[in-house]
Image: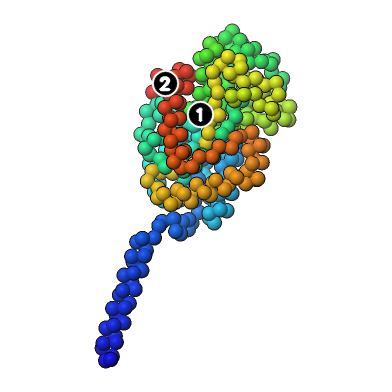
Amino acid sequence: MSARTFQKGCSCLCAGLVLLGAIGSALASPADSYPTKPIRLLVGFGAGGPTDLTFRKLAELAGKQLGQPIIIENKPGAGATLAPSNMARMDKPDGYTIAAATAGLLRFPHLQKVDWDPTRDFTWIAGLGGYTFVLAVKSNSPFRTVKELLDYGKANPGKLSIGTAGAGTTMHLLSEALSGMSGAPVTHIGFKSSSEAATNLMGGHVVATLDAAGSVIPFVQSGDLRLLMSFDAEPAAWMPGVPTAKSLGYDLVYPAPYGVVGPKGMPPDVVAKLNAAFKAAIDTPEYAKLLETLRQTYWYKGSADYDKWAREFYVSERSLVERAKLGDRK
C-alpha cells in the first residue's frame, strides 16, 4: 500500500468518525447532561413566610437529587403571579429557570386582564403540597368567635381590617368571600409577605389576619395570637375547638395546592428529571417534618396530572372570584 493510499484511507476514516459523532450529538437528549449549572427558582412571595420556607427546603432537597444548586429568588407582586408570568415571557424553556406556582396563578386572570394564559404559557412540572388557611386575632382581642368579629364589622363599617400576604392572593380572596357571604364590610390590607402581615397584626395595625397556618402557628404557640376559624374541609386535631368556615355556614373549603412550573415548551426529558427530583424531595423525612411544622399537606402530581388539574382548577377559580365579588374589577 502506498503512503498516499494509506493517508487517503485515514482521512476517510476520520471523516466517518466525525460524522458519527455529529449524528450522536444530534440524537442526544437535552436531559442527558441536564443540569450542568445552577437552576433559578422564582418565588412570588417575600422572604420569611411559609411559601418561602417551603420552597427553600424543596430547592435544597431537589438540588441534591440533581447535583446542582437550586437558587431561590423572591419576586413578590401581582398576587404572587409576577414571578411565574415574567418567567413565562422572558426565560428559555431549558429547565434553568422555574417558578413556584400557587393558586393565584390560576385565579389572577379572572381578576384583571393579563397578557399571559395559565393553560397555554406554562409547563406544569410537579404538584407538591397544599396549605391550611386560618383566621386569627391577637390573644387579647375582645373577639373570641367569628360571629363576634363579623358583628363588629357590620356595626362599624370600615373598621374591620384583615391583613394578608398580598392583594390577589388566596388569603385576599377568602377575606372578600367571607365578607360577601356574611354581609360584614371588610377592609383588606395586603402586605408584601405573611411575616409582615403577622407583624402588623401584633402591632395593632389590623384587626385580624387570614393566612397560611404555618405563618400563624408560631404566634399562637407563643400565646400572642388566637385562632378563630380554619378553611379546611374538616376540623383538624391539632386545632382543638377551632371551627371550620363550613361548620359555621360559610361554603369556603380551600386547601390551595402548590407546585413548580416552567416556561411552555420544555423538553419532556428535562421535565421528567425535575419532577423526579422534586418527588424525591417531598418523600424525604426531612420534608415531612417541615410539612408538619408548617401544617401543610402532602399533595403529589406528575406533570400530566398536574396540567390536567390546573386546567380544571382554572375553571373552578372563577366561582370563588364571583363569590368574593371581585370578578367585575377586571
Q: Which residue is drawn at 45% across and 26% down?
A: 317
Residue 309: which disc? none
Where is residue 159 shown, x and y percent of the image? 58, 14
Crowdedness near tag 2: few (<14), some (14–19) or many (≥20) residues, C-alpha within 10 Å = some
Taking 28 as reference, is 54 above or below it? above
Taking 10 as reference, is 287 above or below it? above
Which colour scheme appears in the figure? rainbow
Q: Quadrant of the N terminus?
A: bottom left
Q: Residue furthest top?
A: 155
The answer to whether residue 158 is visible is no
Residues tagged 1 and 2 counted as in contact (Cβ below 8 A)? no
Q: Which residue is drawn at 26% across and 88% down?
A: 4
Q: Residue at x 31, y 82 (%)?
A: 10
Disc 1 and disc 2: Cα gap in Å?
A: 14 Å
Q: Quadrant of the C terminus?
A: top left
Taking 234 as reference, is 47 above or below it? below
Q: What element carries label 1?
A: loop
Where is residue 53 shown, x and y percent of the image? 60, 40
Where is residue 26 shown, x and y percent of the image? 34, 61
Q: Please, what is the three-letter code of the amino acid marked with disc 1? A: Thr
Looking at the image, which is closer to me, 248 or 79? Answer: 248
Sequence-wise first label, 1 or 2: 1
Total of numbered circles in the picture?
Answer: 2
Crowdedness near tag 1: few (<14), some (14–19) or many (≥20) residues, C-alpha within 10 Å = many
Q: Please, what is the three-letter code of the amino acid marked with disc 2? A: Gly
Q: What element carries label 2?
A: helix
Residue where numbered disc 1 is placed? 169
The answer to whether residue 322 is visible is yes
Residue where numbered disc 2 is placed? 327
Where is residue 87 shown, x and y percent of the image? 42, 42
Q: Which residue is drawn at 69% across and 27% down?
A: 237
